[in-house]
Image (tube, rainbow, N blue to C red):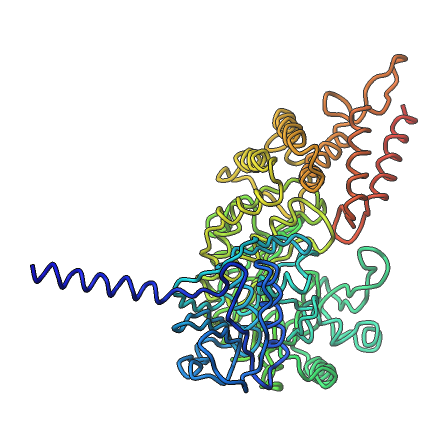
Amino acid sequence: MKKMFYLAVFLTFCLKTIVAQKITLVQNGKSAYSIVMPEKATIVEIQAAKVLQDYLFRITGVSLPVVADNVKSTATEILIGHVNRPEQNKIDYTKLKQDGLLIKTDNTKLILTGGDKKGVIYSVYTFLDKYLGCRKYTSDFTHVPQQKSIVLSSINDVQLPAFSFRETYYNDVYDPEFMNWHKLHSFEGRGGDKTQWGYWVHTFHSLLDPKEYGEAHPEYFSFYDGKRHAGTIPSWDGSSYQPEAQLCLTNPDVLEIVCENLKAAMDKKPEALYWSVSQNDNVNYCRCDNCAALDKKYAAFAPEEKLLSTHGGEKYPALGSGSIIAFVNKVAERFPDKIISTLAYQYSRVPPKDIVLRRNVNIMLCSIESSRNDPMETGDKAFSEDLIGWGKLTDNILVWDYVIRFSNLFAPFPNLRVLQPNIRFLRDNNVSALFEQGNIQSGGDFAPLRAYMIAKMLWNPDIDIEKEKNEFINACYGPAAAGIKEYIKLLHDNNQSGKGVKMSIFGSPVQEQESFLSEKLIAEYNRIFDRAEKKVRHQPEYLVRVKSARLPVYYAMLEIAKAVKTGSRGAFVTGEDGALIPNPKIVNILYEFVYHCLRTNVSRTAEWHTPPKEYLEKYMAFLQGQTNSK
């Protein structure tokens, strides 16, 4: 009996302890709590306190007062940042670093704090998201649940980011609140976030301009095909120029000029930590005797063993990193208080051997050649080997990854299933920073969903991303959500994953017309969208999103129709007189595609060019021209 008595006492004690650990912030529309921030609060701490006050009001209708920590301490406080309270003595801020966050209950108090950069504001948004059910799906779609009471169980939540730099290059994410909510960065300083980058990439021409030095000093530039190449060529859109080649990295004058111009840039932007000293965007590297000797000395393979072809053209050896690292090491020695970043890209992608990187050298490794329908670890063994090789040389690696089809932003691009395996693989192999290049234009294939998923995984690659994806779809598409999920599944089930077929970021829908964009599958996609649109035909906020999700199917149909010209998928049919005339079905799809693009402020159908109106003009000219030629 005594044992039963003691057991009952123990269970009663445990129950009381559990109950005591609960905190009632708001009960039936009333609260005894105040939000406490430091008397000399930072901008981030002030912002965090006001954000919390605002959202608690939105949720419950109760406005908690915001006070400074010079007021008398009470038992009912929400502590924001480095407040003057005894509870602070228990926090080890060194473990939180710059961006780490802490959400913790301490008796009846709630602590929201974090690292000395933006950890505090991250802690508030994470609290709202994880514990109060708020969501920031897009810049203009925020879900805030309505409730009269907020009761918290015991919390002791410490989070550190998987990557020190986290950017997903999508137009919509640069909304300031979206960036803070999802803990994102911007190398350009978008969204009002200060950037640590002075120069980003492809900087050889900025540091030693061929227009300034090319004519007088051709020896500063690449030697190949029996001569120096010190000229320029038009940029892709003809609005400016770009260098035709690279620098001669073994010329001592090149080092002096680059360092002199780099210092001048640093003096103008002393707060910037990262400075890119990196190759121009071409593969015309220097093959002079001295540069070639360095590349050969540090090459980990024979030239024929590592050949790449970025755009499907002629293959080239990817063993040019030796001369670049030797050069960048010298630059890094001149600027020990800065981090000098350089590209491992195209001809310089393969890591060198027998060379030690200076501690302040950052490697920006680019996965531009990888297939996008298979995880890079299994689908691109060559890149995986290079990543692992660089990881043995340094843990200061930023990977530049690619998640869209640049030349056709509206082409269906079924890569959602590889996003998490790729990000996890990078995290697990010494990658410290990640730049996911998405669609900086407005619009594109599932841009809001892909941006949301990537943002979540940049902070925590192990998150249940299927759950997050489904939650996003349910919220954004409402009664049509099941149809959107059905379409995504069918599209991905047919993307040739595991079959040795590469889905390239430079491809076209025409290339996929016998696989996931076959005539049969496109017909099924349209049936799915017909049903989805019908379900939300009286709910315009959902209908507009469903129509946006359908645009890639229409775009694929338009591009394939233009390529095949005639037949059941063609842009033309035979008229009564036997002549070819525009296919009315394709014309109607063209009108619908362009109208919805204009209605939803789509900026481009391809990276940096072809606005919707221009796409319409070109397509109509094609239809008219082909008709007239017949």
Relative image position of residue 71 (x, y in whole percent): 54, 85
Q: Taking 235 as reference, is 246 left or right?
A: left
Relative image position of residue 206 (x, y in whole percent): 75, 73
Q: Taking 60 as reference, is 228 left or right?
A: right
* Residue found at the far top of this picture: 576
Query: Measured along the vertical axis of the image, is residue 545 above or below residue 10?
Result: above
Query: Measured along the vertical axis of the image, is residue 586 above or below residue 59?
Result: above
Of the 4 image quadrants, the one containing the C terminus is: top right
Identify which residue is drawn at 46% across, 55% down: 463
Asked if residue 294 shows in the view, the reply is yes
Query: Measured along the vertical axis of the image, is residue 596 above or below residue 347?
Result: above
Of the 4 image quadrants, the one containing the N terminus is: bottom left
The quadrant where residue 240 appears: bottom right
Asked if residue 426 shows in the view, the reply is no
* Residue found at the far left of this picture: 1
Q: Taking 212 as reference, is 126 left or right?
A: left
